[in-house]
Amino acid sequence: IVPDSSIPVDVLVGRTWLDLPHVNYFKQGGEIVFDSINRVQTDVLDVSRADDNVYVSVTESVRPTKVHITENDVVIDSHVSADHRETLVALLNEYRDAFAKNITELGCTDVIAMDISETPGSVPVSLKPYRTSPSDRRIISSTLHEWREAGIISDSISPYASPVLLVNKSSGEKRLCVDYRRLNQQTVNQPYPMPDVDSQLGVLSHGVIFTTLDLSNGFLQIPLTPEAKDKTAFVTEEAKAKFERMPFGLKGAPGTFQKLMTIVFKDLKSDGVVSTYLDDIILPSKSWDHMMLDLRRVLSALRAANLTLKPSKCTFGARELDYLGFRISEGTVKPGRKVRAIAKFPRPRDTHEVRRFLGLAGYFRRFIIKYAQIAAPLTCLTGKDVPFVWSESQDNAFTALREILCNEPVVRMYNPEAAVTHVHTDANSLALSGILLQGEAPTTLHMVYAVSKKTTSAESKYHSSRLELLAIIWTLNRLRPFLLGIKFTVITDCQALVYLNLHKTVKPQIARWFEVLHEYDFEIKYRPGSRMAHADALSRAVDDETDDADSVDKQLTERLEVCVALTKEERVRFMQRADEHSRKLIALLEYNNELTKQEKSEIENFELSSGVLYRVCEGRPLLVIPKTMRKGIVIEAHDHGGHFGVDRTVARITADYWFSGLRRYVRQHINMCLDCLVHKRPSGKRPGLLHPIPPGKRPFQVIHIDHLGPFETSTSNNKYLLVVADNLTKYVHLYPCGTTDAAGVIRILKRFCDER
C-alpha cells in the first residue's frame, strides 16, 4: 500500500490482489462490495505512519464476518412448515461457526492427527514434476496460492516429492490433485474397524424424520503429524510444498476419518442420537422437537471438535432415507437398490439371453437348493436345434430363480469384517455392471450388492479397455460406503487393467478417475470372460431407461469386448447381410424348405437369433463376423490387447466371435504388425557385439566405400558416385558410375589401386 497525498483516496488495492481466485467483488456506487465479506468503506480505514512504513487496519466493526445461513443454503424437506423452517435456520446461525461456505472457513480439529507409516526399507518417494502447459501452470499457481492463504499447505524442503496433475471437473474446470500412487505402495495399511451395519440399521429404523449432515472437505479438516507433513510433499515445475492437513488420495485417509467420527460422536452414538459411517452423519428423530434437540447436541460436538459442515449438503426433516443400499422410512428397512439390477432382469427373448441369465444364476448355484430342478425348463431351451418357445413353465422357472437371487442365502448383509471381499465388474458399449461379493473363502462368496447402468452416448464410444476401467470406477463409486477402509479385490476380464498402477502419465479424464481410486485399498486381478458370466449378464440386461446424469464424469467432479461397435445389434445385422458369404447362410436359414443335402450341411452349425447370424461351437453361439469387420476385430484383439501371439489372439477372439479362416487371417496380421517386428525378440543366437575398426597405420591402408545416388543421368550415362574414404586421413575420392553392381565396384577399385 503506497500513500500519496496527491491521490484522493485512503487505500490503493493492487490489480494483482483483486485477481486472486478467492477475491470476489463488484462496484456499487462509491463502494467496493466483497462477496461473502462485509462492505469495506474508505472512511473506516485507519492509516498510520511510522518512519517509512505504512500500516493500514480495518476497524473492528467492519472486520469480515461470516455471512448468515439462509433456507437457500441448506436442503429442507418440502413438508416442513414455515415456523419450523424459521427455528431451524435460527439454530443453524447460532452454530454458524460449525458451517463453512468456502475453503477459508474450514475447521481444523485437534482431536486426532494422521500419521503415515512406511514399510521397512522404504526410501523417500522423489519424482520429477509432470510437464504442463503455460495455462495449466497458471491454474496450479493460483490453486497453490489459495491453499496457502487457507493454511492447507506450506513451503517444503522435504526429500519427498510426488508430482501433481490437473484433472477435469464435470463443469469443464480443472482441479489440482497430487499423484500419491508411489507413496501409497510403500505405506503400511492401518485399517480401522468399520461400524456394524446391522446395528446401524437398528438405530435408524426407529426414526420418523431424518437429518443428514456432510462435512465440508472433511479430509482437509484433519491435521497431519510433522513427519507425515514431509511425506505429503509435492512438486510442480515452479514450486515445492507440503500439506498441513490430510489430503485426498492417501492410503490411510478413510480409516483416519472413521476414527475421528467415532471419537467425536462416541457419547451421542451410545444414546442413539446419531449414526455415522465414514462421511455419513445421520440423525434419526421421532419428532421435530426431538430433531432440534438432537441437532443442537451434534452441532455442539462439531463445534467442540472444531469441525465444519457444508450447508448445501445438509438435509433436514426428510421422511425417507437411502443408506447402504437400504430404503429406510418410519419403522421400516427395505432392501432398496441393492438387488435392483437383478430384480429388474428382463425376461429372455431368445436362446442367447436364456444362456446369459443361466450364467448369472449358475454362478450362485451352490447356494440354491435344487438348482438344476428349478432351472430345468430354461436349460432345455439351450439345447442344439431346440426352438425357442417361452411357455408358462419357463416363465415360472425364470421368476423363481430371479426371486431366489434377490434373497438369502444368495444375498447376505454386508460385513466389514468379512475374510474375503470381491468386486466383479464388466462392461460393453451398452452398459456397465458390478457385483459386491463377500465370504470366508473365494470359493464361497455370497452376493451383497449388484449394480448396473446403461452407458451414455459418449461412454458407448469408449475403447473397450477404457470402458472396463469406467465400470470399475463407477462401481467403486456406487459401493463407496462398503469399500472405504477395507482391503478388497477387483476381478475383471480386461487383462490390461492389472497393470493400472504402472502408468506414469495419463490423459486428464483417466487422471481424474485415478484420483478416485487413490482412497481405496485394493488390487486388480484378471479372470477370463468365460468365468465372468454373472457380471456379463448384468451388463447386457439393464433397464430401458437411462439417465445421463448417472455417468461417471458427472458423478465424480474400459470384460474385454473385442470390438465395441459389434455389440450394436442393428449394425451387425446390416453388415452380415452386406457380406456375400453371411448373406447366403442367412438366406438358407430363413428359407429352410426343400434344401439340398449340401445346403443343409452348410448351415448345420449356424443359427439365427434376432436376425443375427451365429456359429455354434461346442454349444456356444459365436457371432459371425463379416469380411468388412474382421480387420477391426483383429486390431482390437492383438494391437490393443498386448500384442500376444497367434494362439492367444485367436483364443481371445473365439471367446465371442468367429469367421472363416480366422487363424490364417490372424497369423498374416501378426506377421505384418510393425510393433511386433520391432520389439519381438529374434530367434536363434544373440547377435555379437560391435567392435570399432582400428585406423590404418598409413594412408589408404584401410578404406571405406559406399554409393551415393541415384542422381540425374549425366552425358556419360553416370548417375551414381562411388565414395572411397581413407580411414586414417579421411581423404575422399569420388568416382562416377552408371550402376551399383559388383562388377562396376571391382573395376573402380582396380583403378583406385593402380593410382596409388
Image (spheres, rainbow, N blue to C red):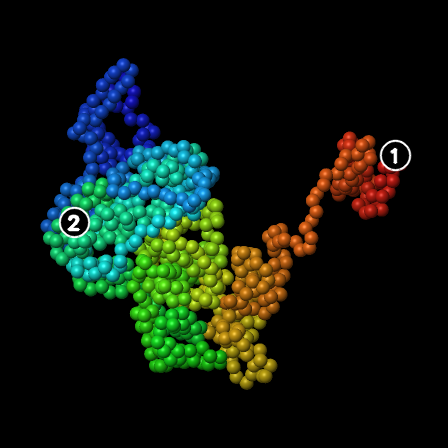
Residue that carries the numbered disc 2 in the rendered image: 295
- Give the residue furthest to the right: 754
- Give the residue furthest to the top: 51
Looking at the rendered structure, the kind of residue marked 2 is Leu
Quarter of the image where one finds residue 438: bottom left
Can residue 313 be seen here? The reply is no
Left or right: 113 in relation to 525: left
Q: Which mark is residue 331?
A: none
The front one of 503 and 353 is 503
Residue that carries the numbered disc 1 in the rendered image: 755
Q: Earlier in the sequence, mark 1 or mark 2?
A: 2
Can residue 624 be seen here? The reply is yes
Looking at the rendered structure, the kind of residue marked 1 is Glu
Left or right: 566 in relation to 156: right
Specify few, some or many for label 1: CA neighbours under 10 Å numbering under 14, 14-19, or 20 or more.
few
Image point (39%, 39%), residue name: 231
Q: Is residue 176 above or below residue 51?
A: below
Left or right: 253 in relation to 211: right
Q: Quadrant of the C terminus?
A: top right
Specify few, some or many for label 2: CA neighbours under 10 Å numbering under 14, 14-19, or 20 or more.
many
The x and y percentages for residue 733 are: 80, 34
Image point (10%, 50%), residue name: 83
The front one of 150 and 22 is 150
Asked whether the residues under the numbered discs 1 and 2 touch, taking CB atoms below 8 Å apart as contact, a structural biologist would say no
